[in-house]
Amino acid sequence: MNEPVRLADKLASFDETFAPKIIGYYNGNKIQIGKVKGEFVWHSHPDTDDFFLVLKGRLTIQLRDRDVELEPGDLFVVPRGVEHCPKADEEAHILLIEPEGTPNVGDADAEAAPEVGI
Amino acid sequence: MNEPVRLADKLASFDETFAPKIIGYYNGNKIQIGKVKGEFVWHSHPDTDDFFLVLKGRLTIQLRDRDVELEPGDLFVVPRGVEHCPKADEEAHILLIEPEGTPNVGDADAEAAPEVGI
């Protein structure tokens, strides 16, 4: 990353939900932005924490024992191994950080999304 | 981190500048918030990239060959080994991510700030 990234501009450049886009790298981690609308799949990442920062809208991270409700400017890290399922009734925008090579569906029985940069 | 962190509330809880506070951890990295006013010191981190996301105000990251100007919602990663010096004419608020154990002054000839959580 030689240039700064304006998150709002990058978010305006795509419409897909549940398809995070890589905007940069930090110490072997992918810095991603994503759009959420509806419910994702229940999954966990056995070996990595999952970083969420809400940029716009409201995001619910469902855990097996409770729901974590997030608004813009709220940050939450799902610890490794903890099952979770993000959902948003209205479209929400998020910043995600995951180690390179981590599929966003974790261990869920679904085809891993490709790692896509913009 | 078992609870979400509302960044604005955490930022309202302290006044010091150039004294990042740890608000959580992600895969061995400190997630920190900080306030910048004035000019920091020139430094680099030989072994780690330096993640900056501006939350409020305007931040200039001076590099030896140019200035990178950042506004709220702008993200910039200073690559490892690159000398930089953040500054802000008016107070700016930032989200920082650094590996645990990384002093915020890098290799600068100054006493490293303690790692402080809130």
Image (spheres, coloured by chain):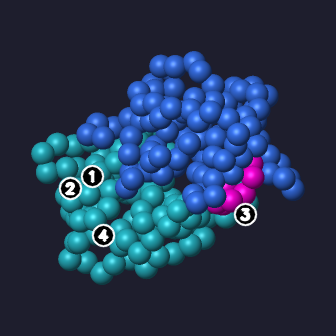
Chain colours: A cyan, B blue
Q: Which residues are magenta?
A: B78-84
Q: Residue at x 57, y 29 (%)?
A: B19
Amino acid at circle 2: Val
Residue A103 in the image, given as x and y percentages of width and height: 36, 73
Asked if labels 1 and 2 touch by Cβ distance under 8 angstroms, the answer is yes
Residue A63 in the image, given as x and y percentages of width and height: 19, 50
Where is mark 3, residue-wise? A2
Tell me where residue A107 sits by quadrant.
bottom left
Mark 1 neighbour class, 10 Å CA radius: few under 14, some 14 to 19, many 20 or more = many
> Marks 3 and 1, how far apart in space?
31 Å
Q: Residue furthest right?
A: B65
> Marks 2 and 4, how far apart in space?
13 Å
Q: Quadrant of the C terminus of chain A?
A: bottom right
> Marks 4 and 3, how far apart in space?
29 Å
Single out the mark in the foreground, 4 or 1.
Answer: 1
* Upstream in sequence: badge 4 or badge 1: 1
Where is mark 1, residue-wise? A79
* Upstream in sequence: badge 2 or badge 4: 2
- Element type where label 1 sits in the image: loop
- Chain assignment, label 1: A
Amino acid at circle 3: Asn
> Marks 2 and 1, how far apart in space?
6 Å
Single out the mark in the foreground, 4 or 3.
Answer: 3
- Chain assignment, label 4: A
Tell me where residue B72 sits by quadrant.
top right
Q: Which mark is residue A82?
A: 2
Q: Residue at x 34, y 48 (%)?
A: A77
Where is mark 4, residue-wise? A105
Vertical placement of residue B115 versus A102, above or below? above
- Element type where label 4 sits in the image: loop
Mark 3 neighbour class, 10 Å CA radius: few under 14, some 14 to 19, many 20 or more = few
